[in-house]
Amino acid sequence: MLGPRQKTLVVISEDDETTFVGVPMDWKVPLLICSDVQALAMATCCPVVSLAKVLSLLGLAPFGSVLMLGVFYVVCLLGALANVVWHDASPGSVLLLALLGLVPTVVLFNLRVYLRELLRLPSAEWSDAGAALCCAPCLLAQASTQVGVSACDCRDNATLVAFPVV
């Protein structure tokens, strides 16, 4: 059985300077086709761990640092929610809760834009923003599948071969 076809682009030029032209890639799995059940389960149940694995495999942040920052974020979010529900429902408290609620959207949007630039995919900022806002677990599962997060566990996978830059 043959594997996926290899695309090669040859550019012949008279310039003295060597230039490399990359061939645009595509996502391994479309966004709303959640075929990798383990990645989707991990992104839904443990999004901080899933994000930490993706960022560490990409070399953007250490696994432990992302976990600690994620736990700190969850504690702050729960504290702000408890403040609004049981203590003070003033506009300032509600605004703080709303801003804290948008943090994952901003992080996932930036991750998606970074992956698009890395893979030379056509930019689609509005669809990326909508995906980060409306279906964050699917977006995180797609990023996990794209980067090659191995299993549904809570271990650091950064010791594996890093994501190849094409």
Image (tube, grey):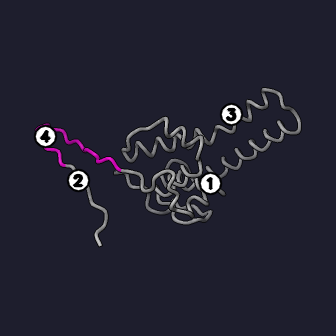
Residue 10 in picture, x, y percent from top left = 18, 48
Q: Answer with mark 3 or mark 2, whichever residue precedes in sequence.
A: 2
Considering the numbered disc 4 on the image, is that residue within a helix, a strand or a loop? loop
Q: Are marks 4 and 1 in contact (CB under 8 Å)?
A: no
Q: Residues within 10 Å of mark 2 (few under 14, many from 20)?
A: few
Q: Are circles 3 and 1 on residues that touch, CB within 8 Å?
A: no
Q: Is residue 93 left or right of residue 41?
A: right
Under circle 3, the secondary element is helix
Q: Which residue matches tag 4?
A: 13
Q: CA distance from mark 2 to mark 1?
A: 39 Å
Give the side of residue 145 with respect to residue 117, left or right: right
Residue 23 lies within the magenta run:
yes
Q: Nearer the viewer, mark 4 or mark 2?
A: 2
**Sequence order check: which comes first, mark 2 or mark 1?**
2
**Pointer 2 residue:** 8
Q: Are marks 3 and 2 in contact (CB under 8 Å)?
A: no
Residue interval drawn in magenta: 10-25
Measured Cα–Cα span from mark 3 to mark 4: 51 Å
Which quarter of the picture shows residue 163? bottom left
Which residue lies under the disc numbered 1? 64
Residue 96 in percent (x, y) is at 74, 32
Residue marked by disc 3: 99
